[in-house]
Image: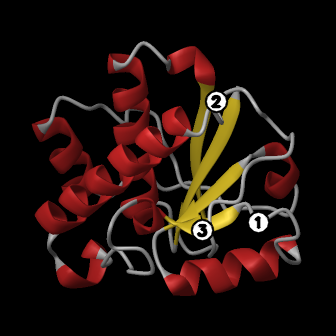
Amino acid sequence: MTGILFVCHGNICRSPMAEFIMKDMAGKAGLSDSFEIASAAVSREEIGNPVYPPARRKLAEHGISCEGKTARQMTKSDYGRYDMIICMDAWNVRNALRITGGDQDRKISLLLDFTDRAGEDISDPWYTGDFDEAFSDIRLGCEGLLRHLLENAEIGYNGKEQPDRR
């Protein structure tokens, strides 16, 4: 089983959208049992809060439920628990590195690194108000991530050495 943790600032918009889009994709591909997929925040601001209503509505428009999800902060122990820590923007990467104490196993990356837009951030719809763009970019990233995992046979590594993704 491959553990994937999606990370954004507050864990109420982008990272839960990524969590549930990826769970939906894995389920439709018959791969739900191949992954442990979760999401977390780099900040403490929204801990315990549900997914932001416009993000929840955007997921629902696509038949995806995020029922029961509440924000939590990423912890140092998440680095050992998950095989991949996928951030929504460069600021999230910097904070994830601060929380984990570094990235010796090269687990931390941007979601759009799995697309032809490597190095780009996913804009935060909390500030932009553009949940359509965020959903589209996150779906693109999740499609690329799933394709990457299947092509590189990384499914099932769970803590073992993985091929270089960068």
The residue lying at 57 percent from left, 60 percent from top is: 86
Cα gap from disc 2 to disc 3, whole angstroms: 17 Å
Kindly identify the amino acid type of the residue bearing the numbered disc 3: Ser
Residue at which label 3 appears = 109
- Label 2 element class: loop
Q: Residue 42 at x, y = what percent? A: 63, 73
* Image mark for residue 106: 1
Towards the viewer: 11 or 78: 78
Q: CA distance from mark 1 to mark 3?
A: 8 Å
Q: Residue 137: x percent and y percent?
A: 25, 62
Residue in the picture at 71% in, 59% down: 164
Q: Residues within 10 Å of mark 3 (few under 14, many from 20)?
A: many
Give the amino acid at mark 1: Arg
User: Residue 50: in sight, yes or no?
Assistant: no
Q: What separation in Å lies between label 1 and label 2 (alpha carbons)?
A: 17 Å
Q: Is residue 137 left or right of residue 66?
A: left
Report the residue at 62% width, 32% height from top. Answer: 153
For label 2, the residue is 155
Q: Earlier in the sequence, mark 2 or mark 3?
A: 3
